[in-house]
Image: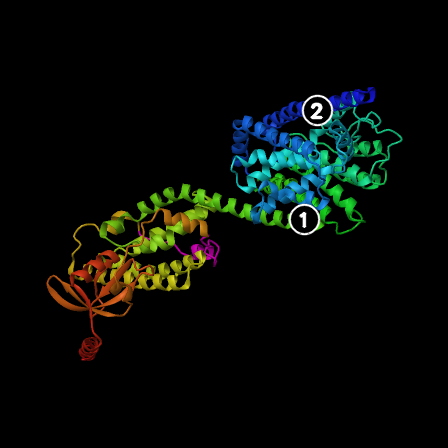
Amino acid sequence: MTASNQRQDSTSKSGEDAFAESASLSKKLITAMLVRMIESAGSYHGWSLSDQDGARMVKLIKHKQRIICSAFWFQMKKHFSEFKSSTQTPSKGKAAADWQHLGLSGATEKVEIDELKAITSRYSEAFEEFDHAILKRLQTCIKKSRANIHQNPLQVKRLCESFQYAIDSLNLEVNYKIALYHLFADRFIEALGPTYRRIDQSLFDAGIQPKIPVARIHLRSIDGLSESKSPKSFKPNQSACLLVLLQRFKEKSRQASSSYKNLFPELKQRFATFELNEYDKQIEQLNQMFKLIFEDEDLPSPVKQQLARLQIYVFITAVQEDGFLRRSSNPARRLLDGIIGSEVEIAKSGNSEFSGIRFIREHIDGMANHGFITVDSYSEMLKGYQVYVKENETSIRKSRKLEATKKVMPLVTTSLSDLTAPLKIQGTRLILFEKVWLPLMVQIALRQGMDSDPWHKVIAMVKKQVWSLIPKSNLEDQEKLQKVLPQVAHSLHRAMRSLKLAESLQQSLRDYLKLEQQNVVEETARNIIEAKRKTRSLSAQSFAPVEEDTTEFDEMMQTGIFQIPAEMADAFKTVKPDKPKKISQVDALSTGEWVNMKLGGTKMLVKLAWKAEDSSLFIFVDRDGKRICELDATKLTQQFESGDISLMDSGSADSEKTQFSFMKSL
């Protein structure tokens, strides 16, 4: 064998060994990177998932760490083998579209493919020098004459394919896969610089392509981006520099920190390192803007922490939109001013729970996860923030009123129960007190307290109402009753207007009061004539003679001044029983209608004189207008079912009514 052939065999053997060693080193370094990525997932906040789902994802990948690492390297080993055995070079078009080789297809997988392509595209320029250097050395190792950049087993696209293969066995939904791709890009691809450097250096030290210097990523440090000054001979690509430099600051914006700082002095220093001086004006303007925000003592710290995350996005918009910061209607400035003005006012009022901090945090989280923002996004965020704050304040105020109503209602109910005890003893329904006086007393108790002048006035009015509904037994009380009844009716009307009750309900309650007062007047007359009361009357036992003037009370009851809010109506519903179910006859019964009723075995014709608006009470009178009975909906339903009450057919009703009218005229 000649000397030249011996040297060729030696070189070939050295190349094969170098190729195997680079594959082994790649396995070691990449596995270590995967482990670090998985272990650091607990502190990652770019999942684009809820906190609960993010925690579940962390737990899953830690549990499946060994499987993920093994599957990743299995696919990487396959890429090395394909590179070594392949003799054909795929076209660029085919290489760019071969994601389907991994089994990705269909509408759902298109989202996944788009995400993988975006990661590949994002880092193509940053790692371009390494891609070419490592590709040339690996070609030399196996004496491969030609190779496409996408055949490089260590290229970002190939690493994305390997990761896709590794997590495919986890059987995750596409949104969870996308979340893992975010983690992979931010914690694995971002940190590839040192790994590429060691692999390239090992091939260089083995004597593979010694004329090609070891590749460098001048914009990267041990953690990803470079903090070292680039060499004078190096002329960076402006777009690539911006992309890589801003990526670090965008990563900081992904999560809110308990501390915050102005990023623009640091950003200006970084830009100066790479001689990017054309953005100094925007940096200086934004530096002053955020400096004033962070020095505002009235602005709560949590709001400052969230607004600090907007710094880099406002800068990106200022760079992309010419004259953005000079506009008088600058949407970013209006957003910041709107949030700051509102949050300072909320803080000064002492109502910190009205704050829109939750909306701000969630909106910026979404923005950070998507990684971009347009000019319109600022206006949309301001509009959404204003709507959220308004709705949040309304909701909290309603909740407060509801809670206060529930606390004060038992006290008011007890007080009213004590006042109306005489009516309960004689069996009088308390509809007027439940519908009017109870809500009015609750409103006054909430607004002015139970020791205020309005409270004492309404208590006096309730006492007068109770006194007026108790039949009297002597001429003196009868005379006073005749004077009091119109006053009570007028005051009740004023109270209902003050509560702004529905007009139909007001009319129904006025009709009910007329019936009650008529019954009291008739009962009083019978008591005096028949001398049924031999002992001191119930009214005299319960109350002193009522002589107070109602003018002051009536003046206090302005229309709508104590209008019942919705939250109070909800509170009333919680302490009242459900409306009883009724049969069709009860539903159809209307005021003024005549029915057949059995009382004590005697059948008689009676008229429905009054019906509660909610059909909870029915009052019947006879031909002379004398009250016969009053029934609730449940009792009335039972009597309809038993046949004790029945509706009259039209012919019988007309005949009875005609006869009644004729006899009445005689």
Name the image quarter holding the C terminus: bottom left
- The kind of residue on which mark 1 rests is Ser
In the picture, the disc for residue 180 is: none
Give neighbour class at mark 2: few <14, some 14-19, many 20+ (Cα, 10 Å).
many
Check disc 1 and report its element: helix, strand or loop.
helix
Q: Is residue 444 visible?
A: yes
Q: Position of residue 292 (x, y in %)?
A: 75, 37
Magenta residues, start to end: 545-565
Query: In this rendering, does residue 472 appear at all?
Result: no
User: Residue at the location (41% across, 51% down)?
Assistant: 569
Q: Main secondary structure of the magenta part?
A: loop
CB within 8 Å, label 1 to label 2: no
Q: Residue at horizontal 73%, vertical 22%?
A: 13
Q: Position of residue 354 (x, y in %)?
A: 57, 42
- 550 part of magenta stretch: yes
Between 75 and 381, the residue placed more toward the observer is 75
Circle 1: is it few (<14), some (14-19), or many (20+) Cα within 10 Å? some
Residue positioned 72% across, 49% down in the render: 375
Quick one: which residue is furthest to the front in this view?
1
Does 482 appear in magenta?
no
Q: Quadrant of residue 202?
A: top right
In this rendering, the answer to whether 536 lies above or below 654 is: above
The local secondary structure at tag 2 comes to helix
Q: Residue furthest right?
A: 233
Asked if residue 290 lies left or right of residue 582, the reply is right
Gap in angstroms between the C-alphas marked 1 and 2? 47 Å
Residue type highlighted by circle 2: Ser
Q: Residue 329: x percent and y percent?
A: 75, 52
Q: Would you name the residue on which mark 1 appears?
A: 377
- Of residues 291 and 651, the one drawn nearer to the viewer in this rendering: 291
Residue beneath disc 2: 22
